């Protein structure tokens, strides 16, 4: 078993996942990157001295391979960051009658919701066998779920579902000392490409500089949840407007 803590990060080849992978590696963690993009995923793993597995998070079997490889390599998994996500152009059907396909394409919710459900299921399985009983799952939701971003109905629905998953699992698994939390980022400059997609649709993005969330604030939010032994079922919004707004459900 590795003496270093081990993190598995979906979507670790780019953006928020990559920023977090770099920080954890600097902090002495072993990092396993699971991403659909072989090129960026491999480059990220090489850069931080981690491992890469090509994974499509919408497939349980595909994700399971990354968990198996990580366990075989290091004999422990202490932290899972279920972070892979996309914005699919089909999500814009609400603002443009001309965008195909006529039947809504649910790729966004498959990646963002099914992906997190599979990650969570696998994380629980490995956390329960972990030699160190302090494990943490963090999922990436979005501040857009809270503000019901009108142009992104499928994305908002998907990210709201991630909040439900976090609260339900967070409450249930606390008794096993497994902490489940979520970050809700505001707009961060990454490859997810909302501005690019809006431009393609003829809409000029109007997000002012002071509304952009800095990547280091997102990583700060991940570390805050990761390092707080009392954080469970917490949703931590981290956006330029409401930096570090923390919410914990009050259970009846
Ligand atoms: P990004 O595009 O830079 O990174 C997303 C990563 O997920 C990419 O490496 C991509 O290859 C990977 N990925 C996509 N589909 C996948 C699949 N099926 N299987 C495995 N990997 C897959 O974007 P990002 O902004 O870093 O996104 C990370 C998370 O943050 C997402 O869940 C996104 O919805 C969320 N988020 C982003 C913003 C933002 O403004 N950038 C805001 C709120 C939430």
Image (spheres, rainbow, N blue to C red):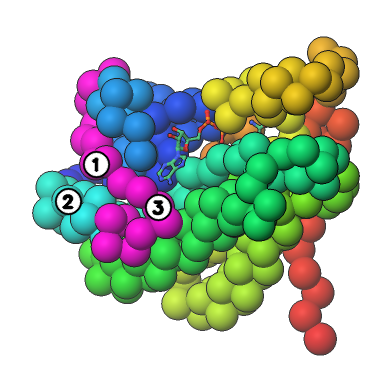
Residue at (68%, 52%) from the top-left corner?
102
- Provide the residue designation for mark 3: 57
- Mark 1 or 3: in front is 3
Region of the chain picked out in magenta, as a range? 44-63
- Provide the residue designation for mark 1: 53
Residue at (76%, 63%) from the top-left corner?
248
Q: Which x, y percent locates residue 99? A: 72, 39
Q: Is residue 66 left or right of residue 87?
A: left
Q: Is residue 17 visible?
A: yes
Q: Gap between marks 1 and 3, in whole Å? A: 11 Å
- Provide the residue designation for mark 2: 69
**Residue placed most toward the observer, 78 or 189:** 189
**Residue placed most toward the observer, 2 or 222:** 222
- Mark 1 or 2: in front is 1
Q: Gap between marks 3 and 2, in whole Å? A: 15 Å
SS at circle 2: helix
Which quadrant is the C terminus positioned in? bottom right
Mark 1 and mark 2 in contact? Answer it, CB < 8 Å. Answer: yes
Mark 1 and mark 3 in contact? Answer it, CB < 8 Å. Answer: no
């Amino acid at each position: 078993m590795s003496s270093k803590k081990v993190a598995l990060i979906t979507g670790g080849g780019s953006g928020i996942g990559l920023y977090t992978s770099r920080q954890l590696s600097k902090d002495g963690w072993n990092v396993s990157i699971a991403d659909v993009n072989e090129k960026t995923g491999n480059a990220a793993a090489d850069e931080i001295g981690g491992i890469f597995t090509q994974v499509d998070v919408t497939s349980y079997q595909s994700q399971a391979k990354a968990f198996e490889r990580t366990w075989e390599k290091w004999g422990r998994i202490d932290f899972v960051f279920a972070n892979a996500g996309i914005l699919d152009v089909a999500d814009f059907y609400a603002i443009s009658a001309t965008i195909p396909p006529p039947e809504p394409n649910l790729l966004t919710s498959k990646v963002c919701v099914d992906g997190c459900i599979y990650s969570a299921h696998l994380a629980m399985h490995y956390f329960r066998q972990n030699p160190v009983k302090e494990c943490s799952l963090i999922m990436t939701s979005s501040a857009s779920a809270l503000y019901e971003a009108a142009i992104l109905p499928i994305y908002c629905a998907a990210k709201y579902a991630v909040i439900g998953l976090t609260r339900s699992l967070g409450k249930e698994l606390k008794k096993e000392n497994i902490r489940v939390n979520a970050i809700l980022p505001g707009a961060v400059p990454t490859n997810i490409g909302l501005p690019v997609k809006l431009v393609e649709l003829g809409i000029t993005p109007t997000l002012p500089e002071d509304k952009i969330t800095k990547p280091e604030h997102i990583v700060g939010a991940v570390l805050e949840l990761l390092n707080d032994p009392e954080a469970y079922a917490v949703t931590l919004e981290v956006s330029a407007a409401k930096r570090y707004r923390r919410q914990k459900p009050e259970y009846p």
